[in-house]
Image (spheres, helix red, strand yellow):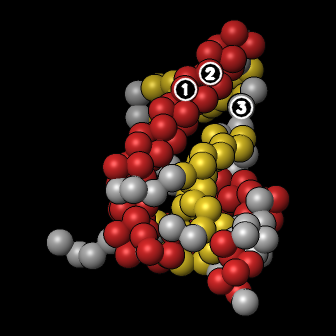
Amino acid sequence: MAEVLATNGVDKRKVMVAIDESECSHHALLWTLDNLKDSLLNSTLVVFMARPPSQQNLSFAANLGLARMYCPVSAAPDFVNSVQEQHRKLTLALLEKAKEICAARGVTAETITEVGDPKVAICDAVEKNNVTLLILGDHGLGKIKRAILGSVSNYCVQYAKCPVLVVKKAAE
């Protein structure tokens, strides 16, 4: 019965791979295509990438000998728009490349991008798009960096409304 529903598109699974410009997310995409290809033939594969939100205030460091002074500066609107456009172009190019990688392996993929903090944007996209499995790469942050910076994968494991698979790259 479940197979009939899946083929009719009523109960089709949706798998989302969240990527960024890192080698770890590229590895997660390749791992997904290599290890879940048979499952993906009956599912929708979505490749997702978050774009950073615009920053109206930027900090610049001024070198004053041994001391540094950090000055928050309001960026000119043209500069902010230019940065946003560059982020948009980079994101679309990376998503297009991911789509080509999927197609080369016989898998059709949809692409989605959202503006926002990556960990929150990923979890929001999971919920909004009824994703049934989220796949992420692990950046391999150490315990201290993870505690200070926070880990996107840890956040998603805690807050995503679906099962989360974190793909670690094997040590070389």
Q: Which mark is residue 55?
A: 3
Mark sitting earlier along the chain (1/3): 3
Residue 126 at x, y percent in the picture: 73, 64
Q: Is residue 138 visible?
A: yes
Rate crowding at label 2 as few (under 14), some (14 to 19) or many (20 or more) other CA atoms within 10 Å.
Answer: few
Q: Which mark is residue 24?
A: none
- Mark 2 and mark 1 in contact? Answer it, CB < 8 Å: yes
Amino acid type of the residue tagged 2 in the rendering: Glu
Residue that carries the numbered disc 1 in the rendered image: 89
Residue 107 at x, y percent in the picture: 45, 57
| Looking at the image, residue 141 lies above or below residue 61 | below
Rounded to the nearest angstrom, the CA distance separating label 1 from label 3 is: 17 Å
Rate crowding at label 1 as few (under 14), some (14 to 19) or many (20 or more) other CA atoms within 10 Å.
Answer: few
Between circles 1 and 3, the one closer to the viewer is 1
**Horizontal arrangement in the rendering, residue 147 relative to residue 142 (left or right):** right
Residue 125 at x, y percent in the picture: 74, 57
Residue occupying image coordinates x 42% and y 70%: 37
| Looking at the image, residue 9 lies above or below residue 100 | below
Residue that carries the numbered disc 2 in the rendered image: 85
Disc 2 secondary structure class: helix
**Horizontal arrangement in the rendering, residue 149 relative to residue 74 (left or right):** left
Residue 80 at x, y percent in the picture: 68, 19
Rounded to the nearest angstrom, the CA distance separating label 3 from label 2 is: 13 Å
Residue occupying image coordinates x 17% and y 72%: 172
| Looking at the image, residue 65 lies above or below residue 111 | above
Q: Picture quarter containing residue 81?
A: top right
Rounded to the nearest angstrom, the CA distance separating label 2 from label 1 is: 6 Å
